[in-house]
Image (cartoon, rainbow, N blue to C red):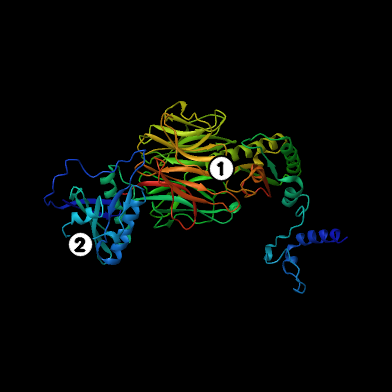
Amino acid sequence: MTHAATKPALIACLLALAACAQPAPPAPPVIDPYAQTGAGAVFQGNLPGGVIGVEGSAQFFRAQVGDTVLFPADQTALTPEARAVLTRQAAWLNRHGNFTAIIQGHAEETGTREYNLALGARRASAVQEYLVAQGVAPGRIRTLSFGKERPAEVCSDESCYARNRRAVTVVSDGGAGL
Amino acid sequence: MFHKLTLAPALAAILVLGAPALPAMAQSGPLRIEITDGVIEPMSIAIPAFHGDAELAARVRQVVADNLTGTGLFREIPAEAHTARPASFADAVSYEEWRAVNAQALVTAEVTRVGEDISVRFRLFDVFSGQPQGDGMQFDARAADWRRAAHKIADQIYARLTGERPYFDSRVAFVQETGPKNARIKRIGVMDYDGANIRWMTDSASLVLAPKFSPDGRQILFTSYDSGFPQIRLLDVASVTSRPLTQDAGAMAFAPAFSPDGRRIAYSREQGGNSDIWLMDVATGGQRPLTNAPSIETSPSFSPDGSRIVFESDRSGTPQLYIMGLDGGEPQRISFGDGRYGTPVWSPRGDMIAFTKRIGDRFHIGVMRTDGSGEKMLTESFLDEGPTWAPNGRVVMFTRVTPGGTGEPRLHSVDITGRNMRPLQLEFAASDPSWGPLLP
């Protein structure tokens, strides 16, 4: 199957970004997902599920562990679904002690800017507390809130709001900045 | 009498130029439009072409006219209807001709320019009683400040005809918003209250929120993500430089507000997910908490005498408004209507609090007295928020956001009677207005 064949090829490309940065002669009009991304090539294609990366990578954390948990309207308590995701996050962080995490709390647009900043902070903190309870060292985690400043989805109805009431765990290697 | 006022930087000098005989005021008192909650018939005002430097005079005249008619309290009599054609600023007023076109008030003015210096002189007349209303005045300014001279004239006219304190010669700090909704680029600007003379105060490199003018208009507090985390910075308007006021790595800081003397700020400090109101001395950085509750406390605003703070808290389960003294004591809840309240702002007059209110899925800007009585909604839309008071406490400006993926914020203003809702004429999306003081 071509599908099975291309995916490992793309992963190989990712692991050798520079090699992929210069596309082959532009003979057939195929869309090159690495076009114009230069030396810091980033995959811009649209494969379902996104890039996997190696197990100990931020990409893997995002795509396979799950970096986002959602909250009901006006709520900051963790749902069972959120706890399941956070249990995986904690396990991954415990396996990869060289990574640190910044937890970004977010809120939907239907609230004032300042209250939503505070609400997002509560959500981020709820995630932090859960991860710490699962054994992640507190010093590896920082929180901040974006309030309603950085929505994941931009429509103005519940389908988007439900995905904007969230906390996103952003992991990075080497503990820079904590 | 003729007064002279010089618009030097942050300095205003009044000189009496002379004291020509001034007729006694009409026995019925000065010409006056009373601003009430009822329907108002705008006062008709004639503002014929200003004399002097034709090009500059036309611009000054237009700003004066726009300031006055923009209040909804005045209706300008179109120039085509005028029959009087005074040849100079010194000409005697032909009251009969102005009465014939139903002008209640008449403004005459002269704009002279010598190099980079301008002088603007004006007089205001009560047409029906046939006499001047108040003294003539002269404003001297640099040519670059011609709009300020125009605002000063309009302020004089507004104050004399309404009996209210003026507000046109004032500035508004705001946030410009560009880029897509999920990656908004924001920068802080300062503009004349009417949207002109924009100066940028920050670049677009980091997310900035909610600027707040200092009481003297020389500094701006704002929240910046330039460190990666929300912290409060203090910006000097003249030099366009800023420094961090908070930089505690473990605590988010946001929602700052100046005390009336400009020496302290109240703000929200978040630690471990919990936001409380803190008070900081700007000069020393010394600070202490004013609230200590597990609930969200944010959006503080000082009373004009500096003794109390109104703020937002969800300690009751939903966001509501509370007032507390600076010396502790239990905060008193003042909002009791249906819905969720936020962003309370104390009026510069001290008698009212403007706020954001959400009822169901609609947002309102409202006002109430400081004891919570007399609650009144001024606006309604998908999303209105963040009122700020004009220096005279008669008008509030706020952010109105349109819904959807291409929705964006625009600044609007409304009279506290609920009349005269109008968008500010800006060529870009903007949010978070903060109305500064009346300039000296």
Count neighbours of disc 2 (C-alpha within 10 A) and say few if under 14, some if 14 to 19, many if 20 or more. Answer: some
Instruction: Name the residue type under label 2.
Output: Pro
Left or right, B375 with reference to A71: left
**A133 shown above or below B58:** above
> Residue reaching furthest right?
A1
Residue B191 x, y percent position in the rendering: 40, 54
Pointer 2 or 1: first along the chain: 2
Q: Which chain carries label 2?
A: B
Count of numbered badges drawn on the protein: 2
> Viewer-proximal residue, B27 or B154?
B27
> Viewer-proximal residue, B218 or B95?
B95
Residue B433 x, y percent position in the rendering: 45, 47
Which residue is rendered at x = 28% and y = 59% of the image?
B81
> Viewer-proximal residue, A144 or B282?
A144
The residue that disc 1 covers is B249
> Viewer-proximal residue, A1 or A22?
A1
**Residue B440 visible in the snapshot:** no
**Residue A157 visible in the snapshot:** yes
SS label for mark 1: loop
The residue that disc 2 covers is B86
